Amino acid sequence: MPQQIQYGLIFDVDGVIADTEGINARASIRMFEELFGLAGVCRDDFEKGLGRGAAAYVRAAAQVHGFEMTEEQVKQATHRRQENIVAILKKEPSPAFPGVLDLMHAAMESTDFRVAIATSSSRAISEAVLKAAQIPYQNFTYITGSDVTRKKPDPELFLTAAARSGIDPTRCVVFEDAPDGVKAAKAAGAKCIAITNSATADKLTEADRIVDSLAQIDLETIRRLLSA
């Protein structure tokens, strides 16, 4: 009997699995006020740092406000931001976006799919998100920003996820919500489905497909995309 073809599904976390971008922004806004007395920071200020790791995320907002952060300040900021995010997630529900769990469970029940989580976030933050969203991440390959040295748009994160899943990246679909994440997926040689949870469609045009919700995607759609 011929060997089953293996396909890989690689999920980003923030803005793909759950609506955490608002939580990230709130935790970071609070951090700037607590540590540096910087008021007036808003969610849009973080846009250029989306999907690029905690340091790039906080620097993006700081630069909008003309605040040039030292390396020590960035270290303090990312640590406090992480504490704030985990505290918020313990108090507030953060359910998975529509279609996420259905797609994951379908893949788990299929003989020709494997699932991976690949996020630029730290283990502490991403695990808090996954637990809050009731994601069965213990069954998946799980790569965080701590496992790689280069951040998106570099493809290292997705190449590592594919390698640890034992699947060629060209046989993988990456689910992303940020422009740099889309660039990273394509640079890895994977197909990319972008979801407009965090950025508008006009900023995600490098993706192979753009959707408003993963409820619009099923395994047959992915098989066709990977076979095209």
Image (spheres, rainbow, N blue to C red):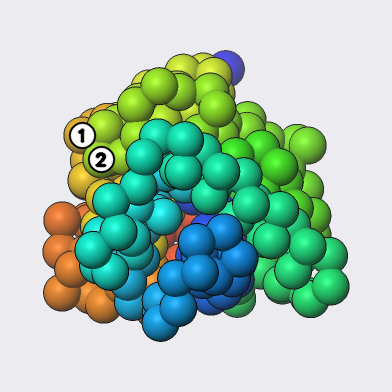
- Which residue sits at x=25%, y=40%? 153
* Residue 26 point in image, percent of width and height: 57, 74
**Image quarter in which the N terminus is found:** top right
- Which residue sits at x=40%, y=35%? 71
* Residue 44 point in image, percent of width and height: 33, 77
Q: Residues within 10 Å of mark 1 (few under 14, many from 20)?
A: some
Q: Are marks 2 and 1 in contact (CB under 8 Å)?
A: yes
What amino acid type should be assigned to the residue bearing mark 2? Pro
Whether residue 104 is visible: no
- Which residue sits at x=22%, y=46%? 183
Q: Which image quadrant is residue 46 in?
A: bottom left
Q: Nearer the viewer, residue 28 or 141?
A: 28
Q: Residues within 10 Å of mark 2 (few under 14, many from 20)?
A: many
Q: Which image quadrant is residue 144 in?
A: top right
Residue sitting farthest toward the front: 37
Report the residue marked by disc 1. Answer: 187
Whether residue 41 is visible: yes
* Residue 150 point in image, percent of width and height: 34, 26
Report the residue marked by disc 2. Answer: 153
